[in-house]
Image (cartoon, rainbow, N blue to C red):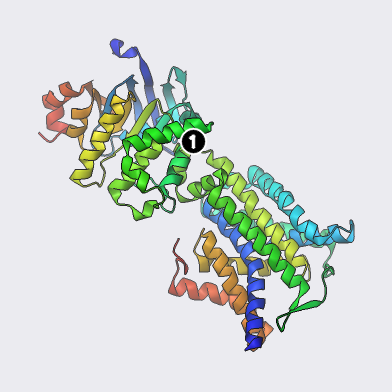
């Protein structure tokens, strides 16, 4: 653990959280370092998405700490954490159905104060997703599931983020789109943005990741470098389907 | 035929004011998630606002309409901050019961302080003819004001930064949150807008109809019919719904009776819920 303490963008320590009185996380610890893709895997109900929600301040942590960019943000309001540099792409239908692409990007840029900043962010996002440019006026509910996922990702990237949280980016997408999504994640990583991914397609996520954590019923189970976890016989048998 | 056209236009004018009340209700419902049973009472307060300003301060009622917007907006923001925000995460029934109580409290207070005497603002009287048709001045001016406020509301929601954020909060509150939008602030602002629309509608209504403490009841039932017609939280639907209710009322009053016109709101709600519960318009 010691060597992972340096250059930490995000550190989660002993996080306890859940929905109302139902405790889902019973003390989770993990960290994301500069320039890393970190995968969070584990069976259904392990609490992977819950970790992301608690980090983003969408769920209350009853115990434990979330430290983002060397500052404790445990239970801070979401808009404060986002303004600090957290980009979060939630799971599932994550667009504003009746709003255009341009309006999504406007909303993504909500925390940017200056026009110039916003223009730069737009340029960056259009460079990553060139096809969004010609669909600026199209509404989200006129787009396919894969396009919506990309739009959601683009929206999340509008905030000059320092860390990207991705919740099941491949959920419900065709294999072609899944590949595109992961290619984009690699591009995003190359641009220097660290990324914490929750993914059902565990083997694929680990392949693309520098580091991984395996959760089970709200607790840490295994952790290690992406390749090491992929080659770990226990992890393979239990979580990667043999 | 001329008569029919005149009644149609009269219905449109009526409906434009109903639409203001309905849009306020649907906006708060869609964004804040609260069904404001007391919405009609703010219409009543708006009407009294214009009445007192006119009779005590001799304030031009048209000025009252403009003034009512910031006044009722602030009132709404205050009420939401102190009372209704705490209901957002509670069961829907809590909001229903609380705003129901608020409604009873407000009209009883109005009755206590201002008595049951029917009041009216006699400011714009008389008619003016237009291409062979005759229109009451007060109704024509009311229509102009309602159209102006509606246009302002639509432009605000479509183009302004806050307007977009309000739509975003309504369509997907969680994603709005992770955009860094303070959705609590948006709810407060929207609640203020809803109350401002009710208050402004009340001041406009004072130009044409009698004012009394229980008048809110008839407007909340119309507003519910409008919201059901237009689809919950659908602001364009509420505009259309308001115009439909207004035209229906004018037609039924003319060709059947004024008494029959009173059943329009409840009949509309019943029919729409039976036949097309999501409302007539796509969101």
The residue positioned 77% from the left and 65% from the top of the image is B213
Q: Is residue B18 left or right of residue A75?
A: right
Which residue matches tag 1? B180
Image spot of residue B245 (x, y percent): 59, 73
The residue positioned 61% from the left and 77% from the top of the image is B247
Q: Is residue A189 left or right of residue B235?
A: left
Image spot of residue A132 (x, y percent): 35, 44
- Displayed quadrant of residue A183: top left
As drawn, B167 above or below B110:
above
The residue positioned 56% from the left and 44% from the top of the image is B162
Image spot of residue B182 (x, y percent): 54, 38
As drawn, A223 above or below B40:
above
Q: Nearer the viewer, residue A104 or A222?
A: A104
Circle 1 SS class: loop
**Which chain is home to disc 1?**
B
Image spot of residue A36 (x, y percent): 29, 22
- Displayed quadrant of residue A168: top left
């Amino acid at each position: 653990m010691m060597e992972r303490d340096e250059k930490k963008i995000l550190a989660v320590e002993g996080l306890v959280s859940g929905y109302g009185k139902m405790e889902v996380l019973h003390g989770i610890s993990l960290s994301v370092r500069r320039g890393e893709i970190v995968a969070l895997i584990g069976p259904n109900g392990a609490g992977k998405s819950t970790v992301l929600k608690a980090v983003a301040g969408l769920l209350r942590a009853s115990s434990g700490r979330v430290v983002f960019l060397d500052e404790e943000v445990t239970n801070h309001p979401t808009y404060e954490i986002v303004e600090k540099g957290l980009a979060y792409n939630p799971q599932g239908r994550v667009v504003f159905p009746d709003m255009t692409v341009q309006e999504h990007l406007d909303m993504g840029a909500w925390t940017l104060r200056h026009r110039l900043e916003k223009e730069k962010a737009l340029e960056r996002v259009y460079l990553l997703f060139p096809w969004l440019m010609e669909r600026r006026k199209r509404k989200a509910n006129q787009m396919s599931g894969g396009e919506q996922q990309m739009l959601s990702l683009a929206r999340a990237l509008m905030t000059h983020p320092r860390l990207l949280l991705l919740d099941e980016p491949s959920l419900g997408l065709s294999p072609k789109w899944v590949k595109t999504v992961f290619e984009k994640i690699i591009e995003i990583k190359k641009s220097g943005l660290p990324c914490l991914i929750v993914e059902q397609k565990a083997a694929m996520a680990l392949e693309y990741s520098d580091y991984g954590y395996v959760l089970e019923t709200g607790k840490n189970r295994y952790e290690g470098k992406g390749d090491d976890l992929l080659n770990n016989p226990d992890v393979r048998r239990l979580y990667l389907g043999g | 035929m001329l008569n029919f056209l005149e009644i149609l236009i009269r219905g449109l004018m009526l409906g434009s004011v109903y639409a203001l009340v309905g849009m306020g209700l649907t906006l708060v419902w869609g964004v804040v998630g609260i069904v404001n049973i007391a919405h009609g009472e703010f219409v009543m307060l708006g009407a009294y606002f214009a009445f007192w300003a006119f009779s005590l301060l001799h304030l031009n009622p048209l000025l009252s309409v403009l003034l009512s917007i910031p006044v009722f907006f602030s009132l709404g923001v205050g009420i939401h901050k102190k009372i209704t925000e705490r209901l957002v995460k509670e069961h829907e029934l809590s909001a229903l019961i609380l705003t129901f109580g608020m409604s009873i409290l407000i009209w009883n207070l109005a009755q206590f302080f201002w008595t049951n005497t029917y009041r009216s603002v006699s400011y714009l009287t008389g008619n003016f003819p237009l291409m062979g048709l005759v229109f009451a001045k007060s109704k024509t001016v009311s229509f102009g004001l309602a159209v102006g406020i509606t246009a302002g509301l639509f432009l605000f929601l479509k183009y302004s930064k806050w307007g977009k954020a309000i739509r975003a909060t309504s369509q997907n509150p969680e994603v709005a949150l992770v955009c860094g939008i303070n959705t609590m602030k948006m709810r407060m602002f929207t609640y203020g807008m809803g109350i401002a629309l009710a208050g402004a509608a009340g001041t406009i209504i004072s130009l044409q109809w009698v004012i009394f403490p229980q008048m809110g009841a008839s407007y909340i039932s119309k507003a519910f019919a409008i919201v059901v017609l237009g689809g919950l939280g659908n602001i364009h639907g509420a505009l259309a719904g308001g115009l439909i209710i207004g035209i229906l009322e004018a037609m039924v009053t003319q060709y059947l009776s004024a008494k029959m016109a009173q059943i329009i709101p409840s009949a509309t709600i019943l029919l729409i819920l039976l036949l097309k519960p999501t409302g007539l318009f796509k969101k």
